[in-house]
């Protein structure tokens, strides 16, 4: 995918690079939140490493179309070209967000929340059954989730579950067994409340 979040040692020496973000996102959505992604129209905000980490997995999970929008159109075009499926993955301009229609799934993969900046997004992006998901969690996801709720999204979720799933995947790569994540997820949610 062109980005990595886990490194493992190879028996012959050297390192192998892995990206567990997409598996973690899809597992959080489909297993923890019981979301069937098949047939969804998805909007991916951002085209950096986090977006690269989840784009293919969203398509593999059955998302019908993936529209990629990034402040730098070249980065969005590069990601769509790397995916290589123009019928399902394409780009639009950030300036056109108000006119590109509505989506079932909106994934925020930008660094805006982490940098303390709010995205100025039109409410028209929210489809009737929209699920909005920020790959960040906690305070970094707050602005995007507040926008999603104000716009009437059916679900507004942060990336805490994805974080736990990616950590469990890394643990499995390093130690050969995957820990249960649900009890940790519930504990962290209770502490955050």
Image (spheres, grey):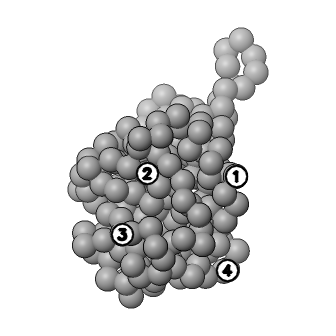
Asked if residue 39 can be seen in this view, the reply is: yes
Task: State which tag comes first along the sequence, 2 or 3.
Answer: 2
Of labels 1 and 4, the one closer to you: 1
Task: State which tag comes first along the sequence, 2 or 4.
Answer: 2
Nearer the observer, 95 or 119: 95
Q: Identify the residue at image location x=34%, y=48%.
A: 63
Q: How crowded is mark 1: few (under 14 residues within 10 Å), some or many (20 or more)?
A: few
Q: In this view, does 36 lie to the left or right of 142?
A: left
Query: Which residue carries the number 1 mark?
Result: 74
Q: What percent of the width, then of the height, locates residue 8?
A: 65, 30
Q: Identify the residue at image location x=41%, y=82%.
A: 123
Query: Which residue carries the number 4 mark?
Result: 116
Q: Is mark 1 on a helix, strand or loop?
A: helix
Task: State which tag comes first along the sequence, 1 or 2.
Answer: 2
Distance, label 1 to label 2, CA atoms, is: 16 Å
Q: What percent of the width, then of the height, locates residue 141?
A: 53, 74
Q: How crowded is mark 2: few (under 14 residues within 10 Å), some or many (20 or more)?
A: many
Quadrant occupied by the N terminus: top right
Of labels 2 and 4, the one closer to you: 2
Figure check: 19 above or below 127: above
Query: Which residue carries the number 2 mark?
Result: 66
């Amino acid at each position: 995918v062109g980005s990595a979040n886990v490194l493992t040692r190879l028996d012959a020496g050297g390192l192998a690079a892995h990206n567990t973000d997409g598996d973690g996102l899809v597992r959080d959505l489909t297993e923890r939140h019981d979301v069937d992604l098949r047939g969804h129209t998805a909007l991916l905000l951002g085209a950096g490493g986090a977006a690269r980490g989840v784009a293919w997995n969203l398509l593999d999970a059955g998302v019908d179309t993936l529209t990629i929008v990034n402040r730098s159109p070249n980065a969005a075009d590069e990601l769509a070209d790397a995916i290589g499926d123009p019928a399902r993955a394409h780009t639009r301009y950030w300036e056109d967000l108000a006119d590109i229609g509505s989506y079932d799934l909106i994934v925020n993969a930008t660094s805006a929340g982490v940098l303390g900046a709010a995205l100025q997004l039109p409410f028209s992006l929210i489809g009737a059954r929209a699920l909005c998901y920020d790959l960040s969690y906690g305070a970094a996801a707050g602005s995007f989730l507040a926008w999603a709720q104000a716009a009437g999204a059916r679900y507004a979720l942060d990336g805490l579950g994805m974080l736990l799933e990616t950590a469990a995947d890394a643990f499995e790569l390093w130690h050969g067994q995957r820990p249960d994540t649900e009890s940790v997820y519930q504990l962290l949610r209770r502490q955050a409340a």
